Amino acid sequence: MSKIYKPEIFYSDDEDFAAMAAGILFEHFEKATNPLVSFPTGSTPQDTYKELVARYADRRDVWDNMRYLCLDDYAGLPENDERLFKNWLGRQLLDPLKIKNRIVFNSAASDTEAEATRMQDYLDSNGSVDVMILGIGSNGHLAFNEPGSDFDSPTRLVELAQDTIESNARYWGGDISRVPHTGYTLGLGDIMKAKKIFLLVTGEGKADILDKAINGDVTESVPASILQNHPNVTIIADKSALFKFKGPKHG
Ligand code: F6R
């Protein structure tokens, strides 16, 4: 049986979340040398990214040495499509911070299996991710690792769960027809090899799943519960996301 670890938890009032999260993440980036970093898209980190840009864009020593590795992305869209997570993150974070070194999925690849293998090969030959920043889906997914994903799953093409498709529609004006049904994702196996994991969680709507993931059973039906087996997880949350949380936490 795998060892269970308790994550370190930082929290703040809801309105202070972005400033706190940006400060904690930046402090970590500052200490890293040439780190390979994965960032999530989604609503949770948006203000945190704004804070990183507003407060630290001039720290060229940090951003020039960073390598960005795509955590997940939609498949089957043309390379310049605004919905692609790599383009979304480009607009919000990578372009403003001038992070040039980007290892991304080619969404338009016709051989999807070869594309997933190319990314896995990069990871296998360049060492694991140094700093993995994650959000959590309300069904417990991490990246596009939906409930039922193997805990040792590799980088691969996946079918998105119906609740993920419905939830992603809010990114595109509520139009569900704009949400692709397949995506590439780093696997849970790749996520677990990361040296450091930060999980960003905000809002009451995530309170149940956060408590279940961290205090419930470690089970493939809740992908984020695998984080209990990682020795170096920091959760950065707002008070609303923690209101059902059982167990120790510190501010
Ligand atoms: C996106 C990603 C997803 C999101 C999750 C939470 O790159 O990896 O797993 O982190 O769906 O999304 P929000 O923050 O929109 O609730």
Image (cartoon, rainbow, N blue to C red):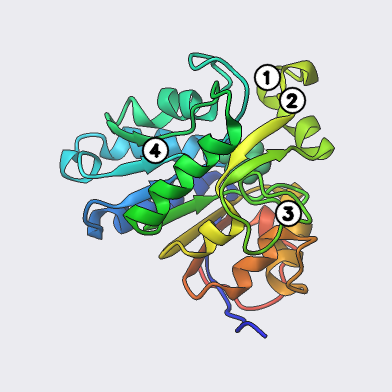
Circle 4 residue:
51
Tell me if label 3 and label 2 are in contact, CB under 8 Å. no
Tell me if label 3 and label 4 are in contact, CB under 8 Å. no
Instruction: Report the Cα–Cα distance between label 3 and label 2.
Output: 18 Å
Tell me if label 1 and label 2 are in contact, CB under 8 Å. yes
Q: Position of residue 15 (x, y in %)?
A: 55, 44
- Give the structural element (helix, strand or loop) at label 3: loop
Q: Is residue 11 visible?
A: no
Between marks 1 and 4 in the image, the one whose residue lies nearer the viewer: 1
Q: Position of residue 167 (x, y in %)?
A: 76, 34
Instruction: Report the Cα–Cα distance between label 3 and label 4.
Output: 26 Å
In the image, what residue type sits under mark 2? Ala
The crowding category of the residue bearing disc 4, from other C-alpha atoms within 10 Å (few below 14, some 14 to 19, many at least 20), is some
- Give the structural element (helix, strand or loop) at label 2: helix
Circle 2 residue:
169
| N-terminal label among 3 and 4 | 4
Instruction: Report the Cα–Cα distance between label 1 and label 4.
Output: 23 Å
| Front position in the image: 221 or 126 | 126
